[in-house]
Image: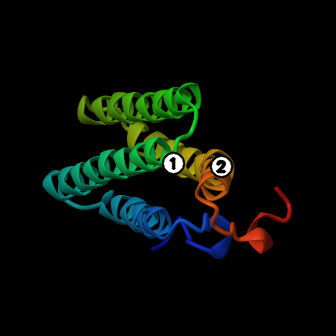
Amino acid sequence: MSVMHWSVSYYTGLPEVDRQHEALFGLVNRLYDARGDRADVLDQAFAELRDYVREHFSLEEALMAESGLDAGYIARHHAAHENFVMRVDELWNFHRAGSESAADELLGFLMAWLREHILHTDRKMALEIHARMGTEAPHNQFAHF
């Protein structure tokens, strides 16, 4: 079952970022589906998601640096990423300790944070990168921005 659905509304116009965002949606859906499976299956789904998140955040931060975005902006974006990872780890540890509500709370947090971060923070980042690189931002996708 899909609880996160990729659509063009999440499009940044940065091909690798968009590809990875779509993959993240798939990994959240996989984690959701694994909730009723054996613990090792759920653990594997979580580990894959967490590893991929780290890889994705590294890509975003490298793109910002390569594009010459302000160091303060990059630091704030990095801090948001680190806070996300810390909260995900905290919720996962609650789940591993036997909390019955932690898995659902984790999924709710993942879905809400990723949607908000992509639609607002990452799309703003993409606009800045497009401006710095002299590339065309997908204006039709940002009309309501």
What kind of element bears circle 2?
A: helix
Q: Residue 93: percent from the left, percent from the top?
A: 28, 30
Tag in front: 1 or 2 = 1
Residue 76 place in picture, x, y as percent: 55, 27
- The residue drawn where x is 48% and y is 27% is 79
- Dot 2 alpha-carbon crowd within 10 angstroms: few under 14, some 14 to 19, many 20 or more: some
Q: Quadrant of residue 10?
A: bottom right
Circle 2 residue: 128
Q: In percent of the image, x 53 and y 47: which residue is there?
A: 108
Q: Are marks 1 and 2 in contact (CB under 8 Å)?
A: yes
65 left or right of 36? right
The image quarter in which residue 45 lies: bottom left
The answer for how far apart the CA atoms under marks 1 and 2 are is: 9 Å
Q: Is residue 60 above or below residue 32?
A: above
Tell me where residue 102 appears, x and y as whole percent. Answer: 40, 37
Residue 16 in the figure: left or right of residue 48: right
Residue indicated by mark 1:
67
